[in-house]
Amino acid sequence: MIIAANLKTNLTRKETKSYIEELEVCASKTSQEVFVFPAITSLDSFEGSVTIGTQNAYPTQNGAYTGEIGLEQLEEFGIKTILIGHSERRHVLGETQEFIAQKFDYFKRQGFKIIYCVGEPKEIREAGHEKMLEYISTQYKGIDTEYENLIIAYEPVWAIGTGLTPTIDDIEKMHTALKAKSQAPLLYGGSVKVTNAKEVLKSKNVDGILVGSAALYVEHFCTMISYAQELESK
Ligand code: 13P
């Protein structure tokens, strides 16, 4: 399974280094595919079984894009994995679908592994399943759903950082609908924690999890990895 941690704007460079070192100890004992997305200033060349990705980058080799990083800065650390379309970039930082698709296309051409995030806000959720699907379909616009290095993450906006999660039935319903759009591995994200990770991982059409706040505790994240390992060896 795929177990990913999005550290967002948390942990210093020093803290991230010890986080990854500790994580390596538990992750290397499993056959799970483990990803960590640290803050950009904490990127470095880490060796081991954990794949380090970037939370963001501008679709450029280099150039005049104040405050952004490009391919050149990622290549320095051998980073070939990127998170694209995260709800915080869509809704807090104002990235449009057009720009997201451009970014997707650029990093696809560079052969990056892309974890592409989709998910509906609360008002769409309240409008029902059909509206949710309609909304999420717009987030597939300009995205190559057959890209071989694609992983999709379904992260309902209202479930991110709120402690709220859809029911397992709802997760399965949405994941089944999204699997019909793309055969890419499909992760669930949004308030996954030690207490619900096992149930989520067991769900139909869930190939892994993308964890935010609960992954900040390395021991919690390691527990989630061990759940995936247990489930797979059954
Ligand atoms: P939380 O796990 O804090 O809800 O965040 C999920 C997320 O946004 C991962 O990308």
Image: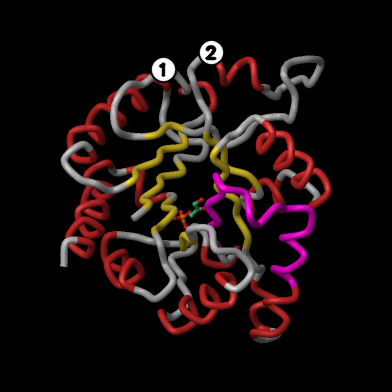
Which residue corresponds to the image point at 30% horizontal and 31% vertical from the top-left?
Answer: 19
Number of numbered discs: 2
Q: Which mark is residue 45?
A: 1
Q: Position of residue 151 (x, y in %)?
A: 53, 52
Decide which of 50, 108 is in the foreground and name it: 108
The local secondary structure at tag 2 comes to: loop
Q: Quadrant of the C terminus?
A: bottom left
Q: Which residues are magenta?
A: 135-154
Is the residue marked 1 within 8 Å of ligand 1, measured from its CB? no
Mark 2: give few (<14), some (14-19) or many (20+) Cα within 10 Å.
few
Q: CA distance from mark 2 to mark 1?
A: 8 Å
In the rendered image, which quarter is residue 13 located in? top left
Mark 1: give few (<14), some (14-19) or many (20+) Cα within 10 Å.
few
Task: Look at mark 2 in the image and give the residue it sits on.
Answer: 76
From where the camera sits, is residue 177 visible? yes
Q: Position of residue 144 (x, y in %)?
A: 70, 52
